[in-house]
Image (tube, helix red, strand yellow):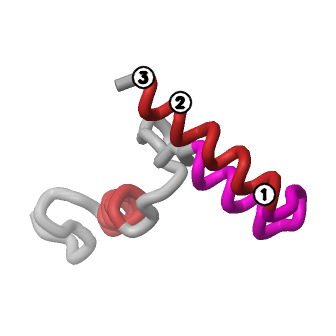
């Protein structure tokens, strides 16, 4: 018998749980357990170090040259 609280066989609490789960999976696309993260390349890290002031421009150019040489040798 229909009692007014049953929506297609699921109570309201189940609809809230399912909608919350779908929002968590699709609307929050980062840091979900089991999902692969985007890895930073060595060039990205080097640029961040230069931007934060950890290294000088000369050190940046030298390290960038070394990374390019390494990349060319591994081909």
Q: Earlier in the sequence, mark 1 or mark 2?
A: 1
Q: Which mark is residue 74?
A: 3
Q: Is residue 68 left or right of residue 24?
A: right
Q: Which residue is mark 1?
A: 49
Separation (CA) of disc 1 from disc 3: 24 Å
Q: Which mark is residue 57?
A: none
> Residue at position x 21%, y 67% from top?
6
Quarter containing the N terminus? bottom left
- Considering only vertical position in the picture, is 5 above or below 31? below
x, y percent for residue 35? 42, 41
x, y percent for residue 20? 41, 64
Separation (CA) of disc 1 from disc 2: 19 Å
x, y percent for residue 53? 88, 66
> Residue at position x 53%, y 35% from top?
69
Residue 46 part of the magenta-drawn span: yes
Question: What span is colored magenta in the figure?
Answer: 42-57
Residue 53 part of the magenta-drawn span: yes
> Residue at position x 42%, y 60% from top?
29
x, y percent for residue 62? 72, 48
Q: Which residue is mark 2?
A: 70
The quadrant in which residue 66 appears is: top right
Separation (CA) of disc 2 from disc 3: 6 Å
Q: Earlier in the sequence, mark 1 or mark 3?
A: 1
Which secondary structure, mark 3?
loop
Which secondary structure, mark 1?
helix
């Amino acid at each position: 018998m229909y009692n007014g609280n049953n929506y297609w066989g699921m109570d309201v609490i189940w609809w809230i749980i399912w909608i919350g789960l779908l929002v968590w999976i699709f609307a929050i696309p980062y840091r979900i357990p089991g999902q692969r993260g985007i890895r930073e390349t060595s060039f990205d890290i080097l640029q961040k170090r230069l931007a934060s002031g950890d290294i000088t421009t000369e050190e940046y150019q030298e390290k960038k040259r070394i990374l390019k040489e390494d990349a060319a040798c591994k081909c």
